[in-house]
Amino acid sequence: MNTVTIPETDICVSRLIFGTASLFSAGGYARRQRVLEAAVENGFTHFDTAPYYGFGMAERDLGGILRKHPRLTVTTKVGLYAPGGEEQSSLSILLRKAGGRFVSALSKPDVDFGVRRAQLSLEGSLRRLVRDCIDLYMLHEPRFELLETDEWLKWLEITQTSGRIRHYGLALAGDRLLPFLRAKSPLTKLVQTFDSLENQEANILTAHGKPLQITFGYVSSARSNGNLTAARDLLLRALQRNAHGAIIVSTRQRERMNQYSQLFTLIK
């Protein structure tokens, strides 16, 4: 798989990043580990996760893979947390996810953009990921008007200087991103955002003189609009669109990993 240095960072990653938001639904622990190992075997070098994904289990699942393959890099996030905490059992997670279909409070994220909570969250993420340092540390869907930006910047800079994170930024959709861009927030030095081939939402970045760095959503957006174009063709076009950054993809089927890596034999 081709690699790229994410613009405005020194982080070299696979052009496709493996996202773990739906990993817990792949099955039991052994099956999830096989999915992650298949990603590594097919050239994925960077993984995207968050404390909220799998209610903490996604970070725990990644911990073993990152320990086994120390050259891999990782993104995790802060601000959205698992209802019930990030250390709960698989059974508790299953019950919460099932119950959340009827009572949303059981499964919706606990939102907290206080720095004190962030300090605890970072400790937890480092422990679950079995890492001393997070490569990319992202604020997870913050609202500009509710964020104490100066306090966050001070904490993030101190944490970066201490060597516990390498780069920091924002992971959010365009409607929440725009106020940060208008304010020329230093947090926009690194941005992970939703994009689609139909509407090209990430153009909000280029309109403000910023490159596309990490984008996602191409296949899911096409499907939601009734576009049945093969995922392979959608991703080839997405790689051309975000030609200098990386794209997050995900699957619960390890058999799909080879299809992702084969995309790069089709790029001229």
Image (cartoon, rainbow, N blue to C red):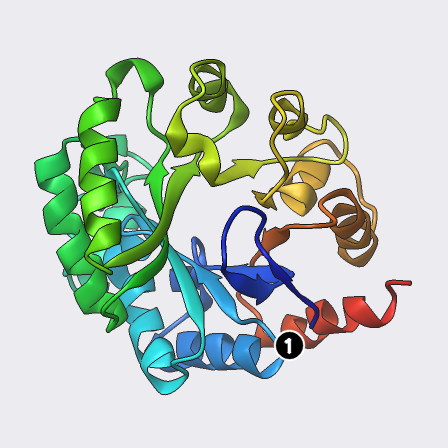
- In this rendering, does residue 111 appear at all? no
Give, as a three-letter code, the residue at label 1: Glu
Q: Quadrant of residue 153?
A: top left
**Residue 253, horizontal then vertical, whole percent:** 57, 70
Which image quadrant: the N terminus? bottom right
6 to the left or right of 76: right
In the picture of the structure, the residue carrying the numbered disc 1 is: 255
Residue 156, position in %: x, y? 24, 42
User: Is residue 78 shown left or right of residue 183?
Assistant: left
| Quarter of the image where the C terminus is located | bottom right
Q: Which residue: 42% across, 74% down?
A: 32
Dot 1 alpha-carbon crowd within 10 angstroms: few under 14, some 14 to 19, many 20 or more: few
Residue sticking out furthest to the front: 161
Looking at the picture, how far across and down is residue 243, in whole percent?
A: 74, 49
Say above or below: 26 vs 19.
below
Displayed quadrant of residue 87: bottom left
Q: Is residue 227 above or below residue 58?
A: above
